[in-house]
Image: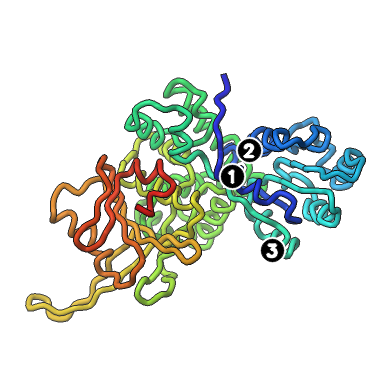
Amino acid sequence: MYMMIARPTYLSQLIAGEGNGLIKIVTGLRRCGKSYLLFKIFTEHLKEKGIDADHIIKIDLEDIRNTALTDPVALVTYIDSRMIDDGRYYILMDEVQNVRDFEKVLNSYLKIDNADMYVTGSNSKFLSSDIVTEFRGRGDEIKMYPLSFREFYSAIGGDKSDAWRDYFTYGGLPHVLQLDSHIKKTTYLKNLYATVYRKDMEERDKIVKIKEFDELVKTMASMIGAPCNPNKLSNTFKSEGKTELSPQSIRNYLGLLENAFIIEKAYRYDVKGKKYINSLSKYYMTDMGIRNALLDFRQQEESHIMENIIYNELCIRGYSVDVGVVEVKGKNEKEGWYRKQFEVDFVANLGDKRYYIQSALSIPDNAKMMQESNSLRSIRDDFKKIIILKDNINPWYTDDGILTIGLFDFLLDPLSLNY
């Protein structure tokens, strides 16, 4: 039985964009639910508000029966044949990057008043750059992620700790919830990477050194949240006796993984200097199931996975997320003058809001609290400072004004940062 999962975050964005004259472009990792969002959830919304079915034109451009429509002229001819009156038509196209010169098709319908365009795509290189260069502000990108823990838990319910264990092990791709055993889930995730994600990149980006590419992907999965750059990664490969990859090759491969929405890059930000530090960055996996499958489920350090999931949750909520660096200078009798750098796990920005956030599995005593809060206590501005703990605790504030909340409160309540 197929499980209905509401995706209110993305549905609300589509509804907000109805009739705004822009092309609504839903991007994201393959199999994260983009097709279901457009063809099921959004279509149901349109029908409930009284839109006739013949004014909703749905085109799946991965369906072999629609192969002819990947030709731009054939696609335009087909859509035109469906638009027979002056009423508004909702044109929903899945995986539009499969259409040759799709930008010209989309631009053609921007000039038609009663055409409201909604498309999905799984490659940001094609879509995001073309929004800027071709649509000139007339494209509205909605970035979609795998299920958040809140969406995941709303679908399965039960004990939160059990749900958390499944979520950080198998991730949030919707189809995983339909599978009832470890073997089925792991097989699905491994096959999905090999036969869909990697195959896409092989064919589209002409990857030749597959072995080296796979080695890099596994390395990135293994070191989520660790500071790195192409030079450092290249040196690591050499020192460990692995196949050699030049810094430029690594840079190119990381770009492919970002374009396919498999990884995301978080830049390091000097909080006091108010500038970005270009030397090292951190990378996080978009889905924990894919990450764990790449590593044969052998490296499941909960602290690192928790940090990654918090990063993803902040991105889902629309925040721009950086890794903070706080430099502290001082003097004491033992060291004399000293300079130390503390790291803030996340600096989350949205409009005029900013939050400094630390992730910690537990804080059993005051010494651990001092260690975890060093970076936050060193920041002198008035933006909110938060520690998220795996422990099931009631929210409380430290004497330094730092909000301490439990992981489940953070993940399940979209307003949790405002406690």
Does residue 340 appear left or right of residue 273 in this picture? left
* Amino acid type at mark 2: Leu
Does residue 164 appear left or right of residue 390 in this picture? right
Q: Residue at x 83, y 34 (%)?
A: 54
Which secondary structure lies at badge 3? helix
Q: Which residue is mark 1?
A: 10
Q: Alpha-carbon neighbours of circle 1 within 10 Å: few (<14), some, or many (≥20)?
A: many
Q: Is residue 206 visible?
A: no
Which residue lies most toward the left here?
A: 333
Q: Is residue 201 visible?
A: yes
Does residue 306 appear left or right of residue 370 in this picture? right
Q: Which residue is mark 3?
A: 132
Q: Which residue is mark 2?
A: 37
Percent x, y of residue 368 = 17, 54
Residues at marks 3 and 2, CA–CA distance in whole angstroms: 24 Å
Does residue 88 appear left or right of residue 228 in this picture? right
Q: Alpha-carbon neighbours of circle 3 within 10 Å: few (<14), some, or many (≥20)?
A: few
Q: Residue at x 78, y 51 (%)?
A: 102
Residues at marks 2 and 1, CA–CA distance in whole angstroms: 8 Å
Q: In terms of image quadrants, where is residue 66?
A: top right
The answer to the question of whether label 2 and label 1 lie on touching residues, with beta carbons closer than 8 A, is yes
* Amino acid type at mark 1: Tyr
Of callouts 1 and 3, the N-terminal one: 1
Percent x, y of residue 252 = 56, 58
* Amino acid type at mark 3: Val
Percent x, y of residue 61 = 75, 38
